Image (cartoon, rainbow, N blue to C red):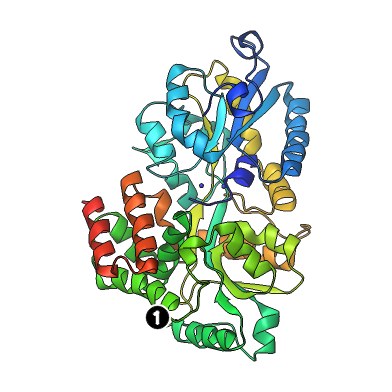
Amino acid sequence: MRTSLTRAAVVAAACLLAAACTGTTAPADDGDSGGDGAQSLRYLIEEQEDAEANKELEKHLGEFTQETGIEVELETLPLDAMRTVLQTQLRSGEGPDVFAWGSGPSFGGALAEAGLVKDLTAAYEENDWQVYDFAKERVTVDGKVYGLPGEAETIGLFYNKDIFAELGLEEPKSLEDLQAASEAVKAAGKTPMAVGNKEGWEGGHLLSMALSSAVGGEGMQALLDGEKSWTSPEVVQALTLWQDFNKKGYLPKSPTSVDYDTSTSLFYSGEAAMIPTGSWLVAEIEDNTDFEVGYIPFPGPDGPGIFTGGLGSGPYVSATTKNEEEAIQFIDFLASPEHGKWVVENLATIPPMEVETEGLDVSPLFKQVLEDTAELSSGGDFGLNIDVLVSDAFNEAMWDGVQGVLTGQRTPQEVAQALEAEQA
């Protein structure tokens, strides 16, 4: 799963061991962080790719300390490390007081089911935390709310407006338009779409966006609820779409050998005209490109399609924390409109609440993403990002399956059958 978990944690998607093993900040001494009247919290987030982001976050957390007198000790770990042993550390009582983690059954839902995180239902009511309804639902288990949702994300198609203008191309409004544009880009000697699927998780996003634009939000929910079969023609067609795009040369050569960072570099350099990925990439696009970029939903069979919606990582409170009151105060800080504005302007990520864009120091591209997200969250149709809403076993079947389709080792029908088997 690739999301902007790191930036979200600062508000995105594994060896929670001693600092000597991980190279991360060492935990606070029990005498400093435990017991009544504690004025220190341990806050664990995914390791940042940009060291400057940590410095900016620490400065921002200093504002919370000034307001409350509560020190926040920031710790970071690689995502793989957190995923591997987070439950073990939380069960032992040695985990952080507050930590950022994904929503959905395989992430926050699993921790809630295991009793490893605090029930925040009463805290929501007492503090009147205003988050999007769909986002709150993602951190709700059996009617109880267990976390603050991470940043809202959309998955769609970024395109190089300069290349499109040079080739006389319009913004794609349907799959037919997308294929025509891809043919023109290919004829011009460039890669139509910068797609890498070496890590596997990227394939889940490819399937999510193509399928969401084909069946709509209700159709996606029906698939996830087991009311619609994963062997349905629409699923097979969505898988076949990427198989065909690869065969036609619309993707980089051997996309399963191309990692995500390489695929983004292809787009930044202008070697590729489009990249199907998520809104978390906006900040990097702005830092690494000198051309104008458009962002649209992945086109559907008969029209523009819809954005796929999802959430990055958000904060949870450990069930074993000795500092519950302080932890709730910290969550209240992260849920505040002021923090939401800071996240927008400093991290170019989208908080799970509406933010007034007037007067914000953001680029036109990011302002568009913010407004699109607010519109979708207030009732528009949006698709679902599959990987955060299903089991680990389903994800493995999906990730391996899309890779198999792209390499020609598996048929779309075989992959659809494997997905149905894991859904059952």
Instruction: For label 1, count other residues whose C-alpha is less than 10 Å away and answer few (under 14), some (14-19) or many (20+).
Output: some
User: Residue farthest to the bottom?
Assistant: 168
Q: In front here: 111 or 19? A: 19
Q: Residue flagged by tag 1: what amino acid is it?
A: Pro
What percent of the width, then of the height, locates residue 265? 65, 64
Q: Nearer the viewer, residue 404 or 41?
A: 404
Residue sitting nearer the eye, 263 or 227: 263
Say which residue appears at 56% left-offset and 24% top-offset: 96
Q: Secondary structure at mark 1?
A: loop
Q: Residue at x 34, y 74 (%)?
A: 240
Q: At 50% across and 25% down in the image, what residue appears?
A: 318
From the top left corner, tell me how far across and down residue 370 is, in percent.
Answer: 63, 61
Looking at the image, can residue 185 be seen? yes
Q: Residue 372's quadrant in the figure?
A: bottom right
Seen at 21% across and 54% down, the residue is 421
Q: Which residue is mark 1?
A: 301
Q: Look at the picture and state if 356 lies above or below 164.
A: above
Q: Is residue 384 visible?
A: no
Tell me: 258 left or right of 269. left
What count of labels does the image hold?
1
Q: Whole-percent x and y of residue 10?
A: 65, 41
